[in-house]
Amino acid sequence: MNIYNRTVALEELPSGSRARIVEIIGRGGWIYRLYQMGLTPGVIVDVVLNIGRGPVIIRVMGVEIAIGRGIARRIIVEPINT
Amino acid sequence: MSRSTHKKEYEIAIIGQPNVGKSTLFNILTGRKAHVANWPGVTVEVHEGETYFNGNKIRLVDLPGIYGFSTLSLEERIARNYILSGRPDAVIVLVDSLNPERTMYLAIQALEMTGKVVIGFTKSDAAHAHGIHINYDLISKRLGVPVVPVSAATLRGIRSLLRSAIDVARGRAGRKKPFRIDYGELEPYVSSIESLLKQYEERLEYPIRWMALRLLEGDDDLYKYVRGVCGEDIAEEIARIREEVKKIFRRDPAELLAKKRFEYLQRILGDAIVRLEIKKGRFERFTRLFYRPFVGPVLSLTILLGMFMIAFTINTGFPLNILLDSLGMHDAASAIEEYSIGGLMEKLFSWISSWIINSFGESWLTDLVANGIISGVGSVLIFLPLIMIVSLFLAILEDSGIAPRMAVSLHGPLSKIGVSGHAIFPMTMSLGCNVPAILATRAIPSRSERLRLLMTLPFIPCQARLVVILAFASSLVSGYGALLVVLGYSAAFLAFAVVNKILYTYEKRKTGGKEPEIVLELPPIHRPLGKVLWWHVWDNSKHFLKKAGTIIFSLSILIWFLVNVSPGIALTDNPGESIAAVISHYLSPIVYPIGIEPGKAWIIAFALLIGFIAKEAVVETLTILTGTSSAQQALILLGLTASQLAALTVFVVLYVPCIATIAVIYSESRSVRHTLATIALMLGIAYVAMLITYGLSLII
Ligand SMILES: Nc1nc2c(ncn2[C@@H]2O[C@H](COP(=O)(O)OP(=O)(O)O)[C@@H](O)[C@H]2O)c(=O)[nH]1
Ligand SMILES: [Mg+2]
């Protein structure tokens, strides 16, 4: 397994990729909701579908979650090469 | 312990993350009918119910579905305060067997508050099919509380869940003290706060360690409470510790603690849960289509439209009759119309009416019963099958998990009018009834979006207004009837879109408001549970029947009197001299602009006035006023032109749906201004739209 040392926004990851969350930028109610849904730094997410428009569909701990692009832009991840 | 110290009555709370199957289980346990929805965050009220087990009475308290105890949303506060109040003898935390790692998060947080916990793994019937195998004993040993697999579908484990809950309530099972998670490098800070609080242990009402954790997480409510009890100095010291953690770890402490909890869960569940890879079902793969641009929204809209088409056809023959008619199969078309459920029921009611008059003779009493009550209530009751069918379809969409996918597919188009995909749930619900739909907006995360929806959701025609549209359509030649239905719904959605867009643009300009966002869990697609579907259908039918039996029934009596009694309190055969005519005389000018002559205008005005109370009443008012047995005959008698009918349909669809909706808008917004603004907005838009429709239809 080879971990890249660069980070990108979740929004930019293509379908089928896997990444580890590094940071969630911003404040407000949204962030706590994301934490509670298991989206905390260190957690691994799979991008189920990202077609460059509309919500990004990810899988975290076996659950699929649709995340709007505005929020996906604020989730900073580190891609994992498998 | 002697037997006599045993309470025979226990209060047991049920909590769980959204969608774990809490409502379904609660309904099974108590025989009550809480709304079951395969949609995160819908159960917002607290339900109570009772059940008996081995001679013990159990009062079950169903708390709102919440993800955790950190955001301090209204629902979380309700649940937290209740659990800490000391009232519950035991807390059942439900965990989804299909999604255990995530849904255990709430269980672990509950365990940090109290040791009196039972963990129930729901949907255990479906776990194996999803390749999930859970070692319940191991989890129970690690957490020190009972862990019980249950299924609302097969009823497995229900009794042992109750037995464990009673054991915990009696102190024979469960933990004596709340659970301690090791927060690793954060522990020194947690302990510092703990020792600050320790000095005040006597006066503090909640577990010390739990408070320390919550204060570190930044719980403002609790902070104020502690400042009140322990004084300014302690509070400042706590704030300082929190700042220090922020500085050293350069992270929000809330994030650090959430992360620790999930890591902890990983450790205790890692070898207790085995997940085998299961090939995704064909249907599951099909649902991916919803996420495609263009295809997704089209698919969603096609499903909704198709559903309504089928429902209409079964009930009224429409629009299949038109199709057959246009293909030249006139006999088949009229047969379908005649033998549709609605057609048959209408025959039945008019047969009963004439039977009563024939058997008991003509008197004011038989007239009241036959032409007042039976035709009034009957003209509305014939729509019961339609309501059952539409509810069934909506229930299937919801329970199968398709609805949240439709929300994702429509998020894009909807965000153009400032509404997120989250709104799809209240929007589809509105097609049934606006009242629960307005309650369902509580699950919408953005407050400003929610307030806009409170004002605009009532534009979406509920089944009551559908009843009126169909009644109006029935008086037209079928092709035009179909157009009228299309017109009604188009006007409604257009008004919904335009008003939302205007409010959103205004808000954006004023406060620089944000784009609508979505964060929505997509539960696995599954075959709907028969039980759950039936609850939905029965719930809606019961609501409708109750309304027909109470409001519509009383209104039909009231209307009959208003129409058959003159202001001098004497029976009159001429409705034109009745009280109704006198009242509505003042209102009639509102329909003059669409060319309705004064002689008939008062009848329409009176029906619209009664329609404020409940929309179905428009139909019954017209039938009673004209002394006919169906809206079709009534409208033919009134001799309205197609243009006038179109204009009236638009008005009926857009103006205030009913008193109940207004009441719930008020109770949800807690603002008289917001409620009055909604009424004014609806009336204004309905009136303008009516005039425009009339004008346009004259040109065409
Ligand atoms: N297979 C299975 N599905 C269930 C069971 N209980 C609930 N469900 C489904 O889970 C979904 C959510 O149910 P609901 O009771 O509304 O969950 P709540 O949000 O926690 O109240 C619905 O689609 C139910 O059909 C069960 O015992 N077995
Ligand atoms: Mg529910």
Image: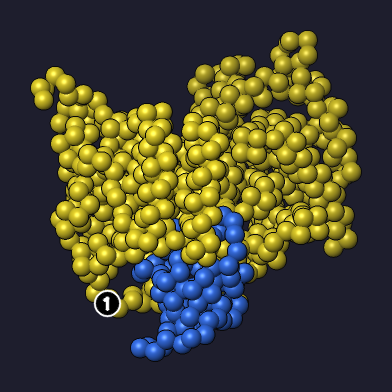
**Residue B410 visible, this angle:** no
The answer to which of A6 and B233 lies nearer the viewer is B233
Kindly state the secondary structure of the residue where label 1 is placed: loop
Percent position of residue B307, x then y: 51, 61
Residue B394 falls left or right of residue B109? right
What color does chain A have in the rendering?
A: blue
Q: Residue at x 21, y 47 (%)?
A: B145
Position above or below: A12 against B156 = below
Image quarter of the N terminus of chain B: top left
Q: Which residue is pictured at 80% across the width and 27% down the height?
A: B584
- Residue A8, image x and y in percent? 55, 81
Residue at (17, 61) in percent of width and height:
B135
Q: Is residue B592 visible?
A: yes
Q: Which residue is mark 1?
A: B277
Question: On the rendered structure, is B493 left or right of B34?
Answer: right
Colour of chain B as rendered: yellow
x, y percentage for residue B200? 41, 32
